[in-house]
Image: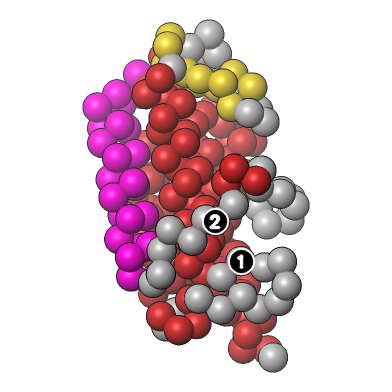
Amino acid sequence: MSFVGMLEAGRRDFLDATREVSEERALVRLHAGAWSVVECVEHVIQVEERYLGLLAEGGPSAVERDLRRELRLFTMIRSRLTPLAAPGVFWPQGRFDSLTKAVAEFGLVRDRSVRMAEEYGEGIAGIGGKHPRFGDLNGAEFLQLIDGHARRHAEQIREMLGEEAEA
């Protein structure tokens, strides 16, 4: 699958997870320390914006393309079985007062990711940057993280809705 195809499939997955959430429910935190659906969307946007910024500022990548490494990064970030705490800089800041606004902004930032994937194609692996947790990454790895991260939070949203239904 192309990077564009991957990012578009991830977009559909993320939007599907939010589709049945009411505006009222989207603002509710199920328990102390949890994020609301709107906050999850904001977090996904923040991370995707940051990764795109790292790529835009990046220079030539010293990291060669390695499909197995890409798959490991995607799988690790995607899996809800691997607990990951977001650094404080990526905690929601209350940018959105509605799910509609947050989802619209997600669409815009995902459009930017898709445009970058279209512009560079497979050559995106030739640019890179330094990820705060994973170190030096090439652009292909950043795109895997962008997509896997959104899918991770799509699953989190589904889990939240399931918890609510069980209560």
**Quarter of the image where one finds residue 32:** bottom right
Q: Looking at the image, tell me whether mark 2 or mark 1 is earlier in sequence order.
A: 1
**Frontmost residue, 35 versus 76:** 35
Magenta-drawn segment: 99-123
**Total number of numbered labels?**
2
- What is the quadrant of the C terminus in the image? bottom right
The prevailing secondary structure element of the residues shown in magenta is helix
**Frontmost residue, 83 versus 74:** 83
Which residue does the numbered mark 1 point to in the structure image? Answer: 35
Residue at screen point 47% across, 18% down: 128
Label 2 CA crowd tier, 10 Å (few <14, some 14–19, many 20+): some
Q: Is residue 46 left or right of residue 106?
A: right
Q: Where is residue 15 in the image (x, y as percent from the top left)?
A: 39, 65
Q: Which amino acid does label 2 sit on?
A: Pro
Which residue does the numbered mark 2 point to in the structure image? Answer: 92
User: Is residue 125 visible in this depiction of the protein?
Assistant: no
**Frontmost residue, 26 versus 12:** 26
